[in-house]
Amino acid sequence: MQMSENASSLERRIDVAVPVAKFNQEVEKRLQKLAHTVKLHGFRPGKVPLKVVAQQFGQQVRQEVLESELESRFVDAIKDKSLKVAGFPKFEAKKGEEGSESLVFGAIFEIYPEVALGDISGAKITRPVFEVTTADVDRTLETLRKQRAVFEPVDRAAESGDKVDIDFAGKIDGETFEGGTAKGVPVVLGEGKMIAGFESAIIGMKPGETKSAKVTFPKDYHGKEVAGKKAVFEITLNRLEAPKLPEFDAEFAKSLGVENGDMEAVRAEIEANLKREVKRRIQAKLKDQVMQALLDSTQIELPNSLVEMEKYRLVDQARQDLEARGMKDMPIPQDMFDEQARRRVNLGLILAELVKTHELHAKPEQIRAVIEEFAENYEHPEEVVRWHYAEPSRLNDAESFALEENVVAWALGSAKVKDKAVTFEELMGN
């Protein structure tokens, strides 16, 4: 086996030979086996002549045998070369010598690059610091209370938080425009779902009143024909309802899943959930910074085959997500995932080398801790834990998460870390 000159630093080329006699022998063997099982119109099962089977399935069988032989002989050919192949090889038929007893193919493939880890000792990482307080629990309780509000008719002027039913008709430069007129539109004032100035114009109105409101569409408005333009809307208030919030009592507690109606138990559960979410958000922000520091410090030539495989996987994932939402047969350009695929492959190679070099593999007790923490979100945590351990493959996600935690912990011990107190809103991204 000869190694040809590389087209790139990662690409390799070798010749793979398949003996013609062995190839024909294997094709004949498979056709004979197929003749005993194939069903063709006009013939009894197992009685189809070999010549007919060869005519019908010969090309397919030859292709299958060739692919199998090439794969097997490629593996044998690189076994003694200490090469770590990335992706799958491409085979190109080569013109053999006249009377040759072998079919010769050129195998083109890539190998994994050598990864020289960079130095992140100078990287600056900000660690958010936040402690859950009673005020945070109170605020969350109030939010849950508002979510369970019941709207009832009231006889007064509209206020923020009220639910209204309106008709409106808009004009730009005295002319109506598409989408500018509607009837019976429900709006909760203060949610900001209408363009600026629209909801504020309704505040103070009473049912049956009509009012003009001057507004300006944002320059980045999705409707390009009206983006950045000024409009005048005639708004009629048809119905007005005010929110009636539930009391903090046993019924409210039961609506949140606490069957005994104990509000203290509700508060305790909210506090525990907030602490879990705060921990998760802090970990996520640290992980993002660590991964970027690793990418910035380590330069790698990426195997194109791995990038293409990752792009294909991302496209397939996006397609499944769209189909789950009822959107089938939508075109998904692979190019839109190019940057994301390159980043994932890059990080995968860096993390693999980092874990090997610093022995950061996830330990069984770490995997168990991840699963138990995840299970706390469910009514019967012990059942969730048992489900994960019933099938080894179900531990993969927890193992990956624990491994990433080890990488982050290692990085925080190597980089320059600065603690920064943040508010609840900053941490949650609101």
Image (cartoon, rainbow, N blue to C red):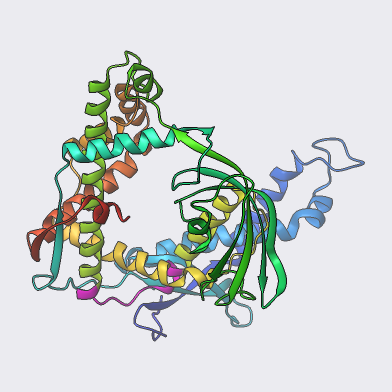
Total count of labels: 0
> What segment is highlighted magenta in the picture?
296-307
Residue 287 found in image quarter? bottom left
As drawn, the residue found furthest toward the top would be: 260
Rendering coords of residue 90 (x, y %): 52, 71
Q: Residue at x 55, y 71 (%)?
A: 217
Residue 152 shows in this picture:
yes
Q: Residue at x 25, y 56 (%)?
A: 426
Residue 367 shows in this picture:
no
Q: Residue at x 26, y 32 (%)?
A: 270
Rendering coords of residue 100 (x, y %): 59, 76
Rendering coords of residue 420 (x, y %): 12, 59
Which quadrant: the N terminus?
bottom left
Image position of 372 (left or right of 32): left
Observer-nearest of 48 and 120:
120
Rendering coords of residue 248 (x, y %): 32, 24
Residue 65 found in image quarter? bottom right
Relative vertical location of residue 270 with respect to residue 207 in this rendering, above or below? above
Image position of 317 (left or right of 350): right
Image position of 366 (left or right of 327): left
Observer-nearest of 65 and 343:
343
Image position of 105 (left or right of 430): right
Inspect the magenta stretch and tell me whether residue 385 lies in it.
no
Observer-nearest of 116 and 380:
380
Relative vertical location of residue 241 with respect to residue 210 in this rendering, above or below? above
Observer-nearest of 284 and 391:
284
Which quadrant: the C terminus?
bottom left
As drawn, the residue found furthest toward the right would be: 42
Inspect the magenta stretch and tell me whether residue 305 lies in it.
yes
